[in-house]
Image (cartoon, helix red, strand yellow):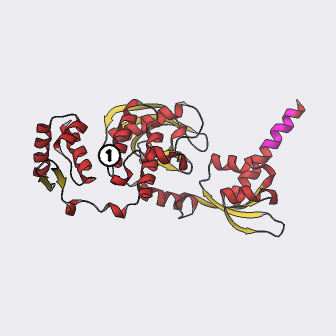
Amino acid sequence: MKIDRLLSIIIYLLNRELVSAREMAERFGVTSRTIQRDMDAIGMAGIPIYTVQGPNGGYGILDSFKMDRSLVSPEDFYYILTSLRSVSESLGGNDEESSGELEGTLEKIKGLLPPSLDGDVFSERAEKLNIDFSMLGGDPRNKGVFRTVRSAVDSEHLIRFSYTSNMLKVTERIVEPMTVAFRWRSWYLYGWCRLRGDYRLFRISRIRNLEVLDEGFRRRDGRFEDFIADWTGDVFGSASGEGVEIILEFSPEMKPLAEEFHEILHINDDGSSVVRMFAPLDGWLYGYILSWGAFVRVLEPEALKASVREAAADVVRKYSNENGR
């Protein structure tokens, strides 16, 4: 499309002092005459194009219009590219359409690289930093659900699905999907639930029987960040934005792992580590704490301590019944 070519030409010129019509024609697969017409169109759009005549001439954009790229270091560009690729891969998966969109966006960002970094900076330094926001493990169908939810958010169409709550209660929901967000080590959907008549947050891995409806919706005013700030304060009694504050005590031999995963508040005389973390009070948290076995003890809050104690007792009863059979 012409508009895509014009945008690409502008980015190309922003990164260079002077480019000949022949060079651009070869790069964008058109004739020199077409490039001349494109320059006229870009100039009419308000971009200050100038022309230098002669064998070494060409087209350029006035320096007063260009962003000072010295404000962005090569490392900044590298981190931008790495983060963009990592997040986009988790959003798009392996489907061809998303992959094409990703490559197009990356090429536009790479077009802003200074001339001294001409080449694929991402490939050269990819081994030095890798970020992965993809869904961790679980049923492979979760990735398909995720892509469908993201598509519904983009197209602003209602979705219908079965949802399992933290209390393992299954309900049928019709939702206006508004935002996909990565929180608390998982992907969530934020939207307006027509069953509850209010904004709700749904963990995508708990969505089943997903269906995108033909009916569209007009996006509501409720912002995701505002919802999170209110939701964490109301539900968890915490304004941290990351769930309730939890205080754990790790056995002395667990100190290296405690330091790796948590903020250390202090070390007791016996060598045990008292740490702090923030997380929602859900099934993941109970499973996480129980996975440490006898090497960790909940100090606060009292409600969590009681829940873990009951869960541990259930485990003991289960194995006791097994031995009695």
Find residue 192 and report its horizontal and vertical position in percent.
Answer: 40, 46
Against 269, residue 105 (above or below) is above
Q: Nearer the viewer, residue 82 or 177?
A: 82
Q: In the image, what residue occupies the spot 38% across and 55% down?
A: 223
Q: Nearer the viewer, residue 275 or 82?
A: 82
Q: Quadrant of the N terminus?
A: top left
Q: Residues within 10 Å of mark 1 (few under 14, many from 20)?
A: some
Amino acid type, label 1: Lys
Residue 260 magenta-highlighted: no
Determine if residue 190 is in view: no
Left or right of residue 107: residue 18: left
Q: In the image, what residue occupies the spot 62% across and 53% down?
A: 281
Mark 1: secondary structure: helix
Query: Which image quadrant for residue 271?
Result: bottom right
Residue 319 magenta-highlighted: yes
Residue of label 1: 108
Q: Quadrant of the C terminus?
A: top right
Against 5, residue 297 (above or below) is below
Against 77, residue 124 (above or below) is above
Q: In the image, what residue occupies the spot 79% across and 42% down?
A: 315
Left or right of residue 267: residue 103: left
Find residue 169 and report its horizontal and vertical position in percent.
Answer: 58, 39
Q: Magenta region: which residues? A: 315-322
Q: Nearer the viewer, residue 319 or 9?
A: 9
Query: Which image quadrant for residue 258?
Result: bottom right
